[in-house]
């Protein structure tokens, strides 16, 4: 799959306190190609505010859509009367469940349990019931509000523990998935046993931009959907099935994605829009209000995690027992994937001979859960790392030392029975953060400069502030797991001095288009590379998630580019009687090893266009069996983070001073991007640790706004210090590179919690950490 | 037919004086005054409010500054948080300046005004506990002339803003003594108060006045705690208190603002409320300690 170069492991560990100035790999001193910090293609437009997001879409004569959403988390719909709404001046169409021509339910991962529009019952606050198209957005909203719905309010099931015994909320029942994992000897016991209960709140992906879409009817009776989709082919297939159209009559065109930490409510947008466009014969646009966004899109799974860790007197893990409960919300979505990750990584990146886990994902009337990066892995990391802190405290060991005694390495088995074959430099990562210099304590004279927890004009008092240092290690899988067909297809064309990449991998802000340019620059030596926008006329590339596109789409681009390269060089090589390997391309010039041949790419092309299409499909995986065993994952990524926090122990306010990150990246394809992704991931993780929780008492989201839902601001974002990026190439991954975005999100919340434990001596079992959990009695002074 | 035209019927007037503004409101009673728009426009954008007309107050220069009148400052309702946060203002009314500096991110403080903060009367309005501690009054301008009411009467709804009335000025005493405003929020960056306290010393009346914000719909004044602590202070001497007295004061304030349920059978307060009480106690103690140091 990869060139021979990728097989050489080249660890480069920055010195303990070395600044995060990542050394470029090999001969990458030029300003392009792999390993260079090529600026992102969309950076300038986004900075200037001219980047076209989905909300900027426009079509001549468009109508505006509004969606009627359920005000109740659980209710029976007794009657639905759209007459008054339809009769309003300016209203062109009102659609409900009865108007869906095709499949009336849809879903991800082959569980089509979610209705396009709720009809008999509503199962969450904000569930779509009807949609309206009108000539003005206000008219559309007023008309949606004029739809008369008679509800019989039902008691909502909002405690996931009660979901097991509650009446079924859905014909499919309340248990979405149960995975028992049995690994080793159930009777093993350790000298030391610690137990813990951990809870993780509901994090919202909170994309910065408005979520929006546009549907345009086609002459042939089909429809074009302009969506900020992260998985255009899946969304096309869903739309085609529900609209009763052949897939070639539905085209999804991906428009500017307003940030994607997870899935947005793409199908929920595309379906009403498509339906309204077909019904009215006009283009129809929908821009979700912030409130709708909070209600409608998928959130991180809230989790309840019970753990029992057994260790010997030296702190070596003997057995881990866990019960993991994920709150899926009303529909399955990707909950089964999240659960698989949670169960498989329940013990963390440690060697544990005996692991027994019961994992459940259950249906409730809470807001929907789905793919938010690091799903499953993040929740359990906060729990197993809490357990490691407990063990260390019990044994009187330094928390870093306790972890060091248990770290996993390449060749060790996961509790799923799968052997870790990729680089797993967990010990090195931990060592790097442990040995990094600590940030200095503020001295008495620069109190002015000391940003206390609670803010600039806050009420923090230096005498009440305690500093804490905590550690966390974590792991996450890359690519889809458990037998998902992970495949991507890309086409590379060269004409004259420029190249084009056609690939349906969506640029969500993760930097795929920049990477694709770098790959082609590297392989073909062509500077001018265009990456065309993604749509469903191209072959599928799959969803933008779990670092997939760096791997599968990047791999497909590389292969296609290499095929073009061979086509380009073969005739030259033949002409000069040498093998292709003796020719090299750089800066648009082709030269032979001995310098005899020197020509340009454009000359060699001689006016011809060369192109090639290639696929990348990593080795297949298998589902976890009835004992939670199986080779379910293609690859794993690891990180160690050391958090330093200041806590005002009277007010319970916390400020993260610094996050020192050591991450296993395989190979840095674009150092600036790698650093940016780590900073972003850590910041999202700090949000999860300290403030982000979309509260939904009795299933109703109380404050669906960015005032009610606090995100980290620039003052909350800690200093992110990348102390080491381990570049031990993953031989099965294209370029040897690992996904970088998810792992900091997985590990950061646990690291912050660990540091708050150190500062306060409190157990800190719940994320986000509430102020009352971070208050402590002053010690000594 | 289209319904698009509905949007264009909106009228905006931009009076240059208070009298003109009052007249504009009288001419169009359905119109709504707008100062910085930081509260109003959020309601408009989210579709909660569709004012038939707007009377912009931004050009009325007489309410954008302040003047002195018999030991008081007469503060224009159009003073922005940014303006009040500056050192010259902080020298006059330090607690109000501190509150203004804490009232949201810089962009909001550049636009948001004192008058808007009072009329919105949000529990988390940062200027409100300061005005309550200062026992400030507001000057209201209306078609029948102007009248003056204590800010607390306005906030409790005892004497609300009448139709057609504008908030013109705030009369606040100049106390020439230390004042503090402290706010606890859920994050380090700008955020709404979980609890706030404003504390002023009034040496002339030998008083300590404290108001607690955000824990109730309007600022709370624990009068007994104020009187108790004022009696402990040696007003003619060093004006210091030992730390235990400050701690006791903090607890006194917190217990008065967040009392136990009258009937013990109702059980303990929930942990979040107990934490809020501890927060009020810590803030009050710190506020007093800083004012006396
Ligand atoms: C992101 C953000 C953060 C914020 N953070 C804080 C914070 O931390 N603390 C805080 O206290 N506030 C905060 N606010 C709220 C707001 O900025 C303040 O309440 C501000 O003082 C409002 O003033 P304004 O001039 O913008 O009021 P406007 O929005 O113009 O008006 C608010 C209301 O008052 C009426 N009004 C205004 N002036 C007059 C007048 N002279 N006479 C009669 N009626 C009048 C208007 O009709 C309207 O009903 C925040 C707002 C935002 C958007």
Image (tube, rainbow, N blue to C red):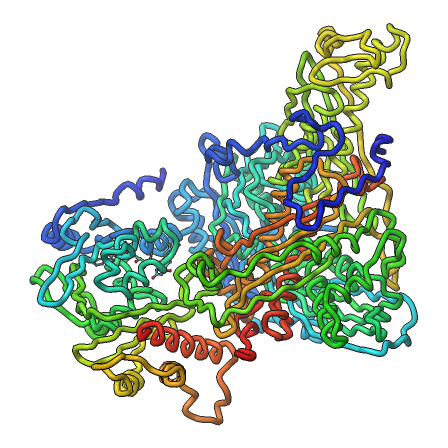
Q: Nearer the viewer, residue A766 or B207?
A: B207
At 25% from the left and 45% from the top, the residue drawn is: B10
- Indicate the quadrant containing the N terminus of chain B: top left, top right, bottom left or bottom right: top left
- Indicate the quadrant containing the C terminus of chain B: top left, top right, bottom left or bottom right: bottom left
In this rendering, does residue A253 appear at all? yes
At 62% from the left and 41% from the top, the residue drawn is: A229
In this rendering, does residue A703 appear at all? no
Q: Is residue A566 left or right of residue A263?
A: right
Measured as percent of width and height from the top left, residue A528 is found at 64, 20
Q: Is residue A90 above or below residue A566?
A: below
Q: Quadrant of ligand 1?
A: bottom left
Q: Is residue B154 above or below residue A492?
A: below
Tally of numbered tags: 0
Measured as percent of width and height from the top left, residue B285 is found at 38, 77
Measured as percent of width and height from the top left, residue A422 is found at 84, 47
At 75% from the left and 57% from the top, the residue drawn is: A336
Q: Is residue A564 above or below residue A760?
A: above
At 70% from the left and 33% from the top, the residue drawn is: A35
Q: Nearer the viewer, residue B238 or A4?
A: B238
Measured as percent of width and height from the top left, residue A408 is found at 83, 57
Q: Is residue A605 left or right of residue A211?
A: right
Q: Is residue A314 left or right of residue A106?
A: right
Q: Nearer the viewer, residue A674 or A524?
A: A674
Q: Quadrant of residue A545?
A: top right
Q: Quadrant of residue B248?
A: bottom left
């Amino acid at each position: 799959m990869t060139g021979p170069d990728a097989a050489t492991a080249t660890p480069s560990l920055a010195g303990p306190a070395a600044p995060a100035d990542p050394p470029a790999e090999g001969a990458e001193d030029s300003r392009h190609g792999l390993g260079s910090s090529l600026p992102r293609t969309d950076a300038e437009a986004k900075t200037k505010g001219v980047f076209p997001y989905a909300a900027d879409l426009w079509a001549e004569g468009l109508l505006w859509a509004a969606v009627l959403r359920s005000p109740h988390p659980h209710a029976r719909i007794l009657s639905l009367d759209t007459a008054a709404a339809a009769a309003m001046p300016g209203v062109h169409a009102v659609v409900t469940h009865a108007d869906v021509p095709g499949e009336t339910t849809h879903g991800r991962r082959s569980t089509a349990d979610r209705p396009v529009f709720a009809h008999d019952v509503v199962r969450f606050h904000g569930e779509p019931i009807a949609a309206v198209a009108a000539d003005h957005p206000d008219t559309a909203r007023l008309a949606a509000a004029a739809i008369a719905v008679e509800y019989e309010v039902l008691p909502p099931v909002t405690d996931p523990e009660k979901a097991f015994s509650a009446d079924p909320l859905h014909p499919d029942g309340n248990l979405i998935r149960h995975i028992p994992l049995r690994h080793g000897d159930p009777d093993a016991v350790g000298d030391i046993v610690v137990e813990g209960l951990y809870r993780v709140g509901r994090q919202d992906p909170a994309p910065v931009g408005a979520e929006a879409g546009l549907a345009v009817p086609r002459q042939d009776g089909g429809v074009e959907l302009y969506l900020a989709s992260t998985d255009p082919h899946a969304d096309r297939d869903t739309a085609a099935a529900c609209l009763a159209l052949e897939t070639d009559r539905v085209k999804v065109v991906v428009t500017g994605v307003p940030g994607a930490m997870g899935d947005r409510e793409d199908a929920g947008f595309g379906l009403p829009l498509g339906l309204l466009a077909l019904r009215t014969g006009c283009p129809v646009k929908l821009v979700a209000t912030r409130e709708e966004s909070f209600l409608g899109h998928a959130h991180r799974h809230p989790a309840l995690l019970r753990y029992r860790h057994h260790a010997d007197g030296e702190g070596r893990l003997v057995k881990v027992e866990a019960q993991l409960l994920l709150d899926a919300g009303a529909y399955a979505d990707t909950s089964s994937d999240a659960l698989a990750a949670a169960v498989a990584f329940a013990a963390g990146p440690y060697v544990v001979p005996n692991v027994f886990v019961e994992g459940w994902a259950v249906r409730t009337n809470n807001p929907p859960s789905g793919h938010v990066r690091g799903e499953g892995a993040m929740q359990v990391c906060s729990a197993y790392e809490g357990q490691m802190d407990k063990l260390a405290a019990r044994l009187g060991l330094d928390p870093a030392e306790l972890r060091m005694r248990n770290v996993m390495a390449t060749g060790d088995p996961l509790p799923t029975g799968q052997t870790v074959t990729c680089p797993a430099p967990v010990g090195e990562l931990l060592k790097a953060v442990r040995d990094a210099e600590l940030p200095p304590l503020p001295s008495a004279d620069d109190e002015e400069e000391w940003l206390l927890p609670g803010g600039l004009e806050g009420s923090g008092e230096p005498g009440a502030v305690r500093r804490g240092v905590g550690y966390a290690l974590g792991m996450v899988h890359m690519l889809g797991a458990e037998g998902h067909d992970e495949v991507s297809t890309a086409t590379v064309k060269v004409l004259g001095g420029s190249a084009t990449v056609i690939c349906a991998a969506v640029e969500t802000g993760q930097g795929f288009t920049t990477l694709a340019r770098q790959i082609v620059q590297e392989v073909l030596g062509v500077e001018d590379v265009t990456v065309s926008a993604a749509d469903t006329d191209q072959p599928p590339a799959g969803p933008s998630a779990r670092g997939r596109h760096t791997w599968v789409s990047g791999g497909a681009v590389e292969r296609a580019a290499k095929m073009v390269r061979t086509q380009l060089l073969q005739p030259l090589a033949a002409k000069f009687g040498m093998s292709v390997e003796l020719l090299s391309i750089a800066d648009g010039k082709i030269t032979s090893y001995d310098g005899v041949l020197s020509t340009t790419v454009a000359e060699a092309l001689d006016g011809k266009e060369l192109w090639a299409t290639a696929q990348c499909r990593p080795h297949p995986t298998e589902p976890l069996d009835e004992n939670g065993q199986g080779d379910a994952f293609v690859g794993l990524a690891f990180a160690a983070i050391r958090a330093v926090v200041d806590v005002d122990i009277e007010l319970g306010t916390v400020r993260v001073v610094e996050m020192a990150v050591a991450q296993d990246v395989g190979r840095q394809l674009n150092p600036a991007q790698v650093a940016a992704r780590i900073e972003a991931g850590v910041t999202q993780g700090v949000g999860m640790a300290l403030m982000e929780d979309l509260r939904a008492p009795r299933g109703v989201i109380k404050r669906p706004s960015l005032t009610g839902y606090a995100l980290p601001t620039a003052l909350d974002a800690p200093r992110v210090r990348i102390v080491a990026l381990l570049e031990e190439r993953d031989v099965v991954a294209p370029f040897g590179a690992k996904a970088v975005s998810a792992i900091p999100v997985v590990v950061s919340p646990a690291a912050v919690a660990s540091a708050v434990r150190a500062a306060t001596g409190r157990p800190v079992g719940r994320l986000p950490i509430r102020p009352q959990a971070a208050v402590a009695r002053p010690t000594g002074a | 037919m289209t319904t698009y035209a509905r949007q264009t019927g909106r009228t905006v007037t931009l009076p240059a004086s208070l009298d003109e503004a009052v007249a504009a409101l009288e001419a169009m009673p359905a119109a709504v005054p707008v100062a910085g728009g930081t509260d109003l426009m959020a309601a408009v954008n989210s579709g909660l409010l569709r004012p038939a007309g707007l009377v912009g107050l931004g050009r009325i220069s007489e309410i954008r500054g302040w003047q002195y009148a018999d030991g008081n400052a007469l503060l224009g309702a159009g003073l922005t948080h940014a303006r009040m946060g500056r050192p010259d203002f902080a020298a006059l009314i330090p607690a109000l300046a501190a509150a203004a500096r804490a009232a949201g991110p810089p962009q909001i403080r550049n636009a948001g005004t004192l008058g808007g903060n009072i009329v919105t009367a949000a529990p988390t309005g940062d200027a409100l506990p300061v005005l309550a501690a200062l026992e400030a009054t507001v000057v209201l301008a209306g078609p029948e002339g102007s009248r003056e009411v204590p800010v607390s009467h306005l906030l409790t709804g005892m004497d609300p803003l009448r139709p057609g009335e504008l908030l013109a000025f705030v009369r606040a005493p100049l106390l020439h003594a230390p004042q503090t405003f402290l706010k606890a929020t859920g994050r380090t960056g700008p955020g709404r108060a979980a609890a706030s306290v404003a504390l002023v010393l009034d040496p002339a009346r030998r008083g300590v006045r404290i108001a607690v914000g955000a824990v109730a719909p309007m600022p709370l004044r624990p009068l007994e705690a104020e009187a108790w602590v004022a009696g402990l202070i040696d007003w003619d001497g060093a004006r210091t208190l030992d730390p235990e007295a400050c701690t006791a004061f903090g607890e006194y304030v917190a217990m008065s603002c967040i009392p136990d349920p009258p009937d013990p059978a109702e059980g303990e307060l929930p942990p979040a409320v107990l934490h809020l009480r501890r927060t009020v106690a810590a803030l009050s103690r710190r506020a007093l300690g800083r004012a006396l140091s």
